[in-house]
Image (spheres, rainbow, N blue to C red):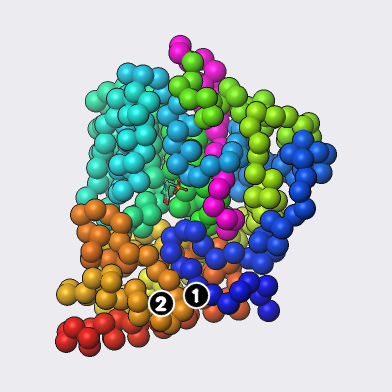
Amino acid sequence: MSIQTPHNTLLIPGPIEFDDAVLQSMSHYAESHVAPGFVKVFGETLTLVRKVFQSTNPAAQPFIIAGSGTLGWDLVSANLIERGENALVLNTGYFGDSFGQCLETYGANVTHLKAPIGDRSSLEEVEQALKEKSYKVITLTHVDTSTGVLSDVKGVAQLVRRVSPETLVVVDGVCSVGSEEIAFDEWDLDAVLTASQKAIGCPPGLSIVMTSGRAIQAAQSRKTPPSSYYASIANWLPIMKNYENNKASYFATPPTQLVHALHTTLTQITVDVPARFAIHAKVSDKVKAAVAELGLKQVASRPECQAHGMTAIYLPEGLVPADVLPGLLKRGVIFAAGLHKEIATKYIRFGHMGVSVTDPKRGDIDNALTALKEALTEAKQAKGL
Ligand SMILES: Cc1ncc(COP(=O)(O)O)c(C=O)c1O
């Protein structure tokens, strides 16, 4: 029996349902952020982040900072690029647009390589773009939450190392870390930013960023100071190093209860990281097969471009999200409406990440698929379709 008040099942692409143990660990008594008990937990949590990224390179550095996923964009933009330098954004939806805006806020010269809706740019197109200009940073959204498009992070990183080895490879992993494979060292990535509330399975409020030695070097050898105070790598680096070395340290107060929750969920995830990716792939295949069976198309058009932690589903002609979402809710299931500006009224989004996927006893996925089928039938009847 769950300790949680009975509630509708949250199956949006983040935040997601919580495991009881994760929630319980947040009701920790008050403690000082510099007390030995908390220092140990924070230090271990940083080490667990390395494991999620399958990273053993001591030059790589994880950061856990109070904030949401967006803070990761600020951290990248304020430290890894300087005013007037070029950034190439591989844009697969809404979150590519926003990351670009954040980079521009800090004075970067941003070029978007925009893929058609539901697709990603080919490696040939990326290569062509990289040859046209010299880029300090290339960014890609591993899973764009507005489209469910999965990017080829490994392929792009390999390409960058071949064609433009100095360019820093930055991945927005807000909707992928914890559900999609990431081999940080092996793929030679420079920064992956994420947040606590999606496939990591923790309440919202933590920005988690993994950086390479090369990224840290770039931050340390800037010609100008970092253009943010709170998001300054120079300010956070010693803090993170100290905590991981079991030494108390202070720059800004960490959200102690959230760190406990993160520790709990990362301990669960890192029992078997490859198994975590495999179960998300398996359940995703099942969802996508069921969606096809209902005669529905996905926004992410090609199987290799489809995320494993969410599915963006086009509604039948004549239906809008407001016709279907209430029917799902009536059946205890919460999906999200469309987000991509150009197609928002045409599709809905189903998040299948974390405990809803890893704990089949909950029945969340089967219930959602049944609810989807019934809600669609009801909506079509209501519209005389
Ligand atoms: C891919 C992606 N990047 C960035 C963000 C921003 O994260 P947050 O809302 O936690 O600030 C989101 C939020 O959903 C996202 O899905």
For the record, the magenta segment spans: 201-224
Q: In the structure shown, which secondary structural element does the residue marked by tag 1 occupy? A: loop
Is 207 included in the stretch rendered in magenta?
yes
Residue lying at 78% horizontally and 31% vertically, measured from the top left: 247
| Front residue of 278 and 327 | 327
Q: Is residue 179 visible?
A: no
Q: Position of residue 98 (x, y in %)?
A: 34, 41
Residue lying at 35% horizontally and 29% vertically, measured from the top left: 105
Residue indicated by mark 2: 329
Residue 359 falls left or right of residue 139: right
Q: Considering only order in the chain, which callout, 1 or 2, is on the residue closer to the N terminus?
A: 1
Residue 234 falls left or right of residue 223: right
Alpha carbons under labels 2 and 1: distance apart: 7 Å
Amino acid on which disc 2 is placed: Leu
Query: Which quarter of the image is occupied by the N terminus?
Result: bottom right
Residue indicated by mark 1: 8
Q: Position of residue 305 (x, y in %)?
A: 34, 56
Does 260 sit above or below residue 166? below
Mark 2 CB lies closer than 8 A to ligand 1: no
Residue lying at 29% horizontally and 29% vertically, measured from the top left: 110
| Front residue of 227 and 125 | 227
| Front residue of 164 and 96 | 96
Amino acid on which disc 1 is placed: Asn
Number of callouts: 2
Residue 46's image quarter? top right
Does 204 sit above or below residue 4? above
Q: Residue furthest top?
A: 223
Residue lying at 22% horizontally and 86% vertically, measured from the top left: 382
Callout 2: few (<14), some (14-19), or many (20+) C-alpha neighbours within 10 Å? some
Labels 2 & 1 near each other (Cβ < 8 A)? yes
